[in-house]
Amino acid sequence: MAELTPPLSGSPRRRSTSSVLLALGVVVTGLALAVTALLPWAGVTAQFSVLDAEISRAVRGVDAGSGWYVLGAGIAAMLLGVLGATRSWLFTGLAILPGAVAAFALAMFLTDPQDLANRLDFRIPGLLSVHPTIQYGWFAGLLSSVAVAVLATAAFLRRR
């Protein structure tokens, strides 16, 4: 016969589907953030007008110090997302911290080599143009760090 009164500790709470989806979103965007540290962030491009050719040299995120911060932040966001899916929504919300650290590290990457960028930027009209460029890995890292922060904020707001 079924028991008619609920247990004293209360009914067991099921995890809501939305909190699990937010946690899985943090895991996926954390993984994407960690991968972006391995992608090219910046480079130097030389364009030869006479030959109509272009030569590029790329710098990956992990080649600079801030790339390691982004890699660590991505791994930390993944771990917090896993904890958020298995334990509590609070862990998912705390993933906003690695997202902010990654965004700050990406900003510091751009401001750090200012003297180098000014020295590398030169031009010989009609013959040669050399300039530094920001490449797709940096933009992917910024997008991933913002996505981690947005999903973590959504986890916090969802439980308010």
Image: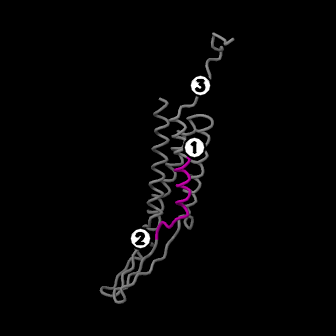
Taking the image as shown, residue 129 lies to the left or right of residue 38, namely left
User: For the residue marked with disc 3, what is the amino acid?
Assistant: Arg
Crowd rating for badge 2 (residues with CA inside 10 Å; few <14, some 14–19, many 20+): some
**Which quadrant is home to the N terminus?**
top right
Between the C-alphas of marks 3 and 2, the distance is 52 Å
Which label number is shown at residue 133? 2
User: For the residue marked with disc 1, what is the amino acid?
Assistant: Gly
Q: Nearer the viewer, residue 45 or 51?
A: 51
Residue furthest right as drawn: 1
Most frequent secondary structure within the magenta stretch: helix
Residue for point 51% across, 70% down: 59
Which label number is shown at residue 81? 1
Q: Position of residue 108 (x, y in %)?
A: 47, 59
Q: Do labels 1 and 2 touch, CB within 8 Å?
A: no
Say if 15 sits above or below 80 in the image: above
User: For the residue marked with disc 2, what is the amino acid?
Assistant: Thr
- Residue range (magenta): 27-42
Q: Nearer the viewer, mark 1 or mark 2?
A: 1
Residue for point 46% across, 48% down: 147
* Residue beneath disc 3: 13
Say if 43 sits above or below 34 in the image: below
- Mark 1 or mark 2, earlier in chain: 1
Disc 1 on helix, strand or loop?
A: helix
Q: Is residue 101 magenta?
A: no
Crowd rating for badge 3 (residues with CA inside 10 Å; few <14, some 14–19, many 20+): few
Q: Position of residue 11 (x, y in %)?
A: 61, 19
